Image (cartoon, rainbow, N blue to C red):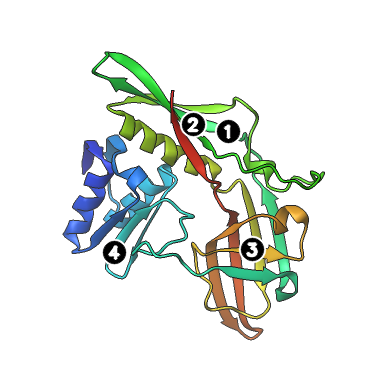
Amino acid sequence: MSWHDVTVERVVSAITHRYGLKPQISEMLMDIEIDHADQTEESDMSFLTRMAEMLGAIATVKSGNLLFIMPGGGVNAQGQPLPSFAITRSSGDRHQFRIADREAYTGVRAYWLDLNYGKKKKVSVKRRKPPKPKKEKSSSREGDYMEGAEGNVFVLRKTYQNEQAARRAAAAKWQQLQRGAASFSITLARGRAELYPEMHGTVTGFKSEIDYQDWTIAKAEHTIDNSGFTTQLELEAKIPEWIAETE
């Protein structure tokens, strides 16, 4: 089966309808257009997962809902905030901190066609600048690994039909680029069954660039064996707030 010139919303809705599921799609993903996609010898869920990965999103089924959403939102299928977590160094016996070895971007730019004036216009999504702290700046990196060099903007090659579609596409690409800029894994000596993906929280007792970061659980693996009950967590740096500007 092949899909041609369709939106993400149409693809996800069509597939969920086959299984009697309710689609839950992030607003910024709905109007993104799929020019062409082949679904060959793969299940519907495998196809949706592959499509989600290309957009920096996640696709999963929960409680009769098919979620096609941007990660890191910290909310459940009903839009309610998830519980937060706190982990101390004494809780774990193994940990690893990683910073992605890749080029960081300051923003994403998308173009759209204004038919009223017959001109191509642009919209940019970029990181919202936090208030400058009053304290003296530390020599540690303290989160700037997600910031990027000034003026290093990722430009989407496609021209979109309207400003809203361009804005959503730029926002989705921005989150895809930001996800995984920094990660932290830890094995908890005493398992915590209440922890699960998409929860937001903090860790303490480590280096400042780890302690000062807001984290999102990307993966939680609970294990019971001869050693007892343990929990292995993969955390990702929480995606910073962003703003969209029409230029």
Q: Amino acid at mark 3?
A: Thr
Give the vertical position of 134 relative to 110 (above or below): below
Q: Residue at x 75, y 74 (%)?
A: 90
Mark 3 or 1 closer to N-term? 1
Mark 1 or 4 closer to N-term? 4
Mark 4 or 2 closer to N-term? 4
Q: Where is mark 2, residue-wise?
A: 108
Alpha carbons under labels 1 and 2: distance apart: 8 Å
Residue 156, numbered circle: none
x then y, percent, for residue 180: 57, 48
Q: Is residue 4 left or right of residue 149?
A: left
Alpha carbons under labels 3 and 2: distance apart: 28 Å
Could you tell me which quadrant the N terminus lies in? top left
**Which label lies toward us, 4 or 2?**
2
Whether residues under marks 3 and 1 lie with C-beta atoms below 8 angstroms apart, the answer is no
User: Which secondary structure, mark 1?
Assistant: loop
Viewer-proximal residue, 186 or 73? 73
Q: Is residue 114 left or right of residue 236?
A: left
Q: Where is mark 3, residue-wise?
A: 202
Q: Determine the image quadrant of residue 215.
A: bottom right
x then y, percent, for residue 219: 53, 63
